[in-house]
Image (cartoon, coloured by chain):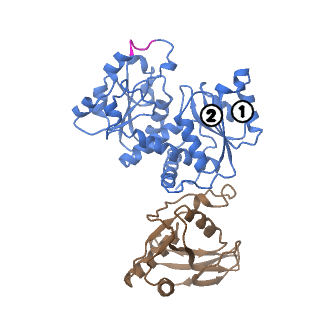
Chain colours: A brown, B blue
């Protein structure tokens, strides 16, 4: 049987994103040399919300979309083929502070490939990681986020389902899916 | 969206589906972004070795494949028959098996005989990509032509494409016809009667003998080279006469009541099928075709490596 538990409702999600923005502002001030890279496909939805919220605070932060497909380490090793998404990074990240943004952090492999992909656009001064959901104790690689929306303890067979309005959902919600 | 090609080898456009073609175009658009970055390389195929086996001369296709392979981080070995043991009498299968014994995962092959890559797939495990087999098919050229039209016009559905020149000896023409028909475009072939294959209209294409009428009809003119090296007998009196009746010049384009796109798969015989002022004009997307060729070949290699 499949169980579906709501871990972030629309309202709670909004509060969480506001809090993440405040944490970013504490560390990056006016965002003079900071850029955000949203990881395709779903990290960009979160990144767009953060960008909009920062704008309402009067802060302008450049945002790029980074696709990690061609840098993944499981190419030809997985059953379902990898399908690429668009990369759109309209700036050079040389000597910039980069915040990588993704919705769910699980094994850390996407973030590793994202760091590889990012290097094609220059050598950043500093790289930070922001994730909405951190699935703790499940990392394959020594990667830890700097900003976390919510820590969730999960087992391998569980899944996090992030629903965003851009994908046709009625509202933004984050669910924990358990298959028995 | 479809995620995987329906085939293990790319032998011809005839064998692939419209969904395959759409997937290749989508992937190629992503690779086009990659090759316009400051660092143009991705590590996707770093554990793959590719042999480029060319039994016929080629500059652009071989360079384009080699660049595509290198930008995907594959290891590349090159082989051309002019300096090899083929001259010493080795068979095709022996040559290829020897190369595969060195642990090669994919083979890109050009051969003068129709069906040579199809024959290979029955005997070897590696993925085979046809880079031109005789006068039969040249699938990556058709894919890059289609992709270039798509980028220029936004869609292929309902577009009118005239293929002008030596249709009889052209693998580019045949692959282009298959691809354009599959993607919903209308196709016309135009050339002197001696250079049009008999029963070509059975492929669902219009036939036109007058180049001016073809230009007036089409949105895109894909102009082909006269392949003198494949013509054992005279198909027309002289190059000068061909150029007079079938060469496209600026004056003809300015007499049309619309703008058309000029394409050419290269190498151009300047002054024969295209005058220089047309080849270098704003109508021509010949150099875009070359750039798109690398992106399309990256997409084909990337997708076949996963199949």
Q: Using the image, tell me which numbered label, if any, was put on residue B175.
A: none
The answer to whether residue A1 shows anywhere in this view is no
Q: Nearer the viewer, residue A79 or B260?
A: B260
Q: Is residue A136 visible?
A: yes
State yes or no: residue B237 in magenta.
Answer: yes
For the view shown, which residue lies furthest in the right direction?
B101
Residue at 52 percent across and 45 percent down: it is: B294
**Residue B96: numbered disc:** 1
Helix, strand or loop at label 2? It is: strand
Please report whichever mark, 2 or 1, sits nearer to the chain's N-terminal start: 1
Residue B129: give x, y in percent of width and height.
61, 38
Look at 40% across and 48% down and name the residue there: B151
Asked whether the residues under the numbered discs 2 and 1 touch, taking CB atoms below 8 Å apart as contact, a structural biologist would say yes
Foreground pick, B216 / B7: B216
Residue B109, label in figure: 2
Res. B93 image quadrant: top right
What is the magenta range? B234-238
Tell me: B200 left or right of B5: left
Distance CA(mark 2)–CA(mark 1): 10 Å
Identify the main secondary structure in magenta.
loop
């Amino acid at each position: 049987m499949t169980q579906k538990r709501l871990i972030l409702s629309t309202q709670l999600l909004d509060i969480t994103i506001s809090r993440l923005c405040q944490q970013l502002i504490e560390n990056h001030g006016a965002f003079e040399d900071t850029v955000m890279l949203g990881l395709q496909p779903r990290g960009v939805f979160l990144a767009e919300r953060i960008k909009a919220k920062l704008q309402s605070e009067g802060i302008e932060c450049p945002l790029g979309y980074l696709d990690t497909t061609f840098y993944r380490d499981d190419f030809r090793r997985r059953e379902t083929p990898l399908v690429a998404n668009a990369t759109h990074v309209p700036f050079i990240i040389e000597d910039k502070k980069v915040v990588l943004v993704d919705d769910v952090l699980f094994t850390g492999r996407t973030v590793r490939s994202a760091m590889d992909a990012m290097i094609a656009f220059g050598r950043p001064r500093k790289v930070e990681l922001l994730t909405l959901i951190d699935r703790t104790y499940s990392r394959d690689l020594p990667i830890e986020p700097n900003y976390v929306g919510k820590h969730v303890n999960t087992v391998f067979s569980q899944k996090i389902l992030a629903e965003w309005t851009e994908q046709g959902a009625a509202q933004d919600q984050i669910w924990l899916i358990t298959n028995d | 969206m479809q995620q995987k090609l329906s085939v293990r080898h790319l032998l011809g456009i005839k064998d692939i589906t419209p969904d395959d073609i759409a997937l290749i175009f989508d992937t190629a658009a992503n690779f086009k972004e990659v090759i316009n970055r400051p660092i143009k390389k991705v590590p996707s195929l770093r554990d793959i070795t590719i042999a480029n086996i060319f039994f016929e001369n080629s500059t652009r296709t071989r360079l384009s494949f080699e660049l595509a392979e290198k930008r995907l981080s594959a290891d590349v070995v090159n082989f051309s028959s002019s300096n090899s043991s083929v001259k010493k009498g080795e068979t095709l299968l022996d040559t290829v098996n020897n190369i595969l014994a060195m642990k090669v995962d994919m083979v890109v092959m050009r051969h003068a005989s129709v069906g040579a890559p199809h024959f290979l797939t029955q005997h070897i495990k590696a993925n085979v990509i046809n880079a031109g087999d005789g006068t039969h098919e040249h699938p990556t050229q058709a894919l890059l032509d289609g992709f270039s039209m798509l980028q220029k016009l936004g869609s292929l559905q309902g577009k009118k494409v005239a293929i002008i020149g030596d249709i009889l000896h052209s693998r580019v023409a045949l692959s282009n016809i298959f691809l354009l028909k599959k993607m919903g475009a209308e196709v016309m072939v135009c050339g002197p009667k001696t250079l049009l294959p008999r029963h070509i209209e059975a492929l669902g294409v219009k036939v036109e003998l007058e180049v001016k009428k073809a230009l007036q009809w089409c949105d895109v003119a894909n102009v082909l080279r006269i392949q003198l090296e494949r013509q054992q007998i005279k198909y027309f009196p002289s190059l000068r006469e061909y150029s007079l009746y079938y060469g496209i010049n600026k004056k003809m384009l300015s007499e049309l009541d619309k703008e058309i796109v000029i394409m050419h798969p290269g190498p151009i015989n300047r002054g024969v099928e295209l005058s220089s002022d047309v080849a270098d004009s704003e109508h021509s997307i010949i150099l875009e075709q070359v750039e798109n060729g690398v992106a399309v070949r990256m997409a084909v290699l990337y997708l076949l490596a996963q199949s």
